[in-house]
Amino acid sequence: MNYRSFKDFVTAATMGFLLLAVSGCTKPQAARDTFPKEFVYSEEVPGYSPAVFENRRQRVMEGMEGQIALVSAAASEDFYYLTGMMEERGIAVLDPKGEHPFILFVLPDDPMATLWTGDRYGVKGAMERFGADTAYPLENFHRMLPGLMIGKETVSLLRGDRSLAEQVENLQMGKGGPRPSYDLTSLVHEMRVVKDEWEVRQLEKAIDVTCFAQQRVLQTVTPGQKEYEVQAEIEYVFLKNGLRPGFETITGSGPNAATLHYYENRRTLQEGDLLLMDIGAACNGYTADVTRTIPVSGAFTPEQKELYNLVLKAQEEAIRLMVPGQKILDCHHRATDVIVKGLYELGLITDTTSWWQRRFYIHYRNDHYIGLNVHDVGSYGEFNEADRNIYATPKYRGRDILPGMVLTMEPGIYLIADRLDHLRRLFGDVATEEELAAFEEQVRPAYEKYAGIGIRIEDDILVTETGNRVLSGKAPKTVEEIEAAMR
């Protein structure tokens, strides 16, 4: 088995332990000797398609500024995007006017490597499976690079690929080396923003299986379980469908649900807890990202329901704006405005126009691309990411939403129990002591009423020519749907 990163290795190495933990789930009606057929993905999904990757390389060769491009497997997702290869080491050469426009340098077929980590594609496989015009052992690259560069005045490289950059710089000091280097990253990442039909099919399977896992937990969760048992149940569904986690599974219960990226997953679920599950299966490298927040006991408390329905309203209104022609941050700002207005009505905000009060509750952009990365690459438009004001007020609107984009929408409310105690550390540089003291005094009764609650609702949305399609609709989402599924 080839691992694309150390993180993938750790995920695989721990999977056996996680699957063993499933047996500890105690809800009697969910027997473990059979796996529900309704949670098995049965549609045919296209696997590796040489034409898909050939088309991408052709687009890069038509759009790149350099006369030759070098792409290393160190930039794993971009290398895979252009070649289809998931091996941990390799170099692709794109030479539009050369005798061999697509050259691969790969790890050779090696009996000892096969013994330890499995078969490699080798030089023959690089040509037969991945469509290279010619291929060589990776160890030959340094020696052959000067010849590849003969007659080339410019070269395109991915940003941050220091190893290749250093080799090119060394050539620049000698004869025949290319002079200017151009950044290939923006071109490739802009291509990755808009998904083709093949990519959408991979995402559809990943998202459906992720929704199956969400449904499975609704049937099996019970007070007394450990968070890691819920994680095991989720990843069991992934594995039964031939998929792996696209990122670290989050199963935060009780106060842990108010931590944005909580990974420890060791707490015991308690009666009355909320359980936040931010999860995603990956299919051929493309990862889903779906979050649901559910009541461990099977029914929301009145306070939980109030905040849950507020987040749900914010998400639904924002999704309606995720259509061609709208600006990408308009949906975020819409969700933010709905949440801020609702928090004001609940007594958790005293001034809806106050930037720092909004920022106290709004911590991130509500939408992001998904694809080969869970937070996929690509531009969101021209704005200053360092501006603390960026996500709390509609100062920036970002780029146009385009058909073929696949984005999440994930508003949330996170009321960490002692966060009010840190007001001065958070906003002492932008608000007066009088403002902070007045805010604290007025909102504390309401804050203590809801303290410890964390809620996030996240769906994956495909933008179409005429609107959008929610790809993750199979996971129950409304209060009524969730409570009915848990009975």
Image (tube, rainbow, N blue to C red):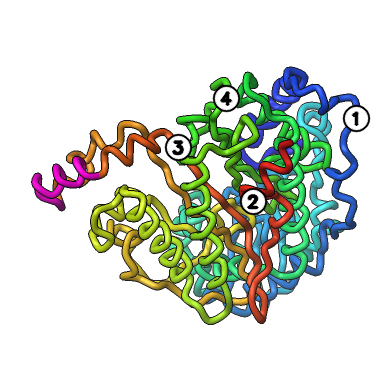
Q: Nearer the viewer, residue 279 or 334?
A: 334
**For the residues bearing labels 2 and 4, Cβ distance under 8 angstroms:** no
The residues bearing labels 2 and 1 have C-alpha atoms spaced at a distance of 26 Å
Three-letter amino acid code of the residue under disc 2: Lys
Q: Position of residue 423 (x, y in %)?
A: 22, 40
Q: Position of residue 379 (x, y in %)?
A: 48, 67
Query: Can residue 483 be seen here?
Result: yes
Residue identifier under label 3: 453
On residue 477, which mark appears?
2
Residue identifier under label 4: 271
**For the residues bearing labels 4 and 3, Cβ distance under 8 angstroms:** no
The residues bearing labels 2 and 4 have C-alpha atoms spaced at a distance of 21 Å
Q: What residue is shown at x 87% (from left), y 38% (from top)?
A: 36
**For the residues bearing labels 3 and 2, Cβ distance under 8 angstroms:** no
Name the side, left or right, on which 16 lies relative to 420. Answer: right
Q: Which residues are magenta?
A: 430-442
Q: Which circle's residue, 2 or 4, is located before the other in the chain?
A: 4
Three-letter amino acid code of the residue under disc 1: Thr
Q: Nearer the viewer, residue 10 or 115?
A: 10
**Does the magenta segment cover residue 484?**
no
Tell me the crowding category of disc 4: few under 14, some 14 to 19, or many 20 or more residues within 10 angstroms, Cα based. Answer: some
Query: Can residue 248 be seen here?
Result: no
Q: Which circle's residue, 4 or 3, is located before the other in the chain?
A: 4
Tell me the crowding category of disc 3: few under 14, some 14 to 19, or many 20 or more residues within 10 angstroms, Cα based. Answer: many
